[in-house]
Image: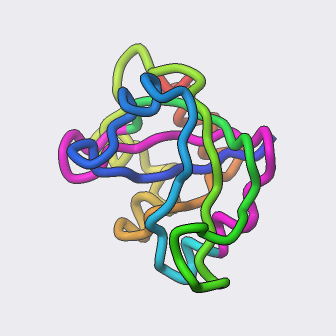
Amino acid sequence: MTSYLLKTEPTVYAFDDLVRDKRTVWDGVANAQALMVLREMQRGDEVLIYHSNVGKAIVGIAKVVRQAYPDPALDDPKRVVIDIQAVRPLKAPVTLAAIKAVPALAQLALVRQSRLSCMAVAPGHRRLLTKLGVS
């Protein structure tokens, strides 16, 4: 199973909203690099949900339930969406400050490319995040 991280602004769509809705279309991605990451995601892949701006922490785990498909709200074949389903909230958020405090996570895309909204999480980084509380 591959792991990814998706960023959301909790004032727009929080992890609690996903828990309530159980499943959602993950849309609104326009950055070419982030769209490439969305296209890589496979059904069953793990998704770490990160609250940006407010909270700045990984707060929950979801999974991909439908692979990339054209955004039905747009007339642009380059823009794709995926469907994700809530798995569970974390017992405690893993803050960006805690992540940055681990030197071995310095190459995590969340640290290196802070504006990217979708990113792959390498297995080694996933193991370190687990130690920080993402289980």
Q: Nearer the viewer, residue 96 or 30?
A: 30
**Outermost residue, top direction?**
91
Query: Horizontal and vertical percent for residue 4?
Result: 62, 50
- As displayed, is residue 105 above or below residue 107? above
Q: Which residues are magenta?
A: 36-57
* x then y, percent, for residue 13: 33, 44
Horizontal and vertical percent position of residue 81: 61, 62
Image quadrant holding the N terminus, namely: top right
Q: Which residue occupies 58% across, 34% down?
A: 62
In magenta stretch: residue 129: no
Q: Is residue 46 magenta?
A: yes
Using residue 124 as the reference point, say whether residue 113 is left or right of it: left
Q: Residue at x 74, y 48 (%)?
A: 66
**Vertical placement of residue 23 versus 117, above or below:** above
Q: Residue at x 46, y 41 (%)?
A: 49
The residue drawn where x is 44% and y is 63% is 117
User: How many tags in the picture?
Assistant: 0
* Front residue of 6 and 20: 20
Quarter of the figure with residue 123: top right
- Estimate the x, y position of residue 70 in percent, counting from the top left: 67, 71
**What scheme was used to colour the molecule?**
rainbow
**In the picture, which quadrant includes the C terminus?**
top right
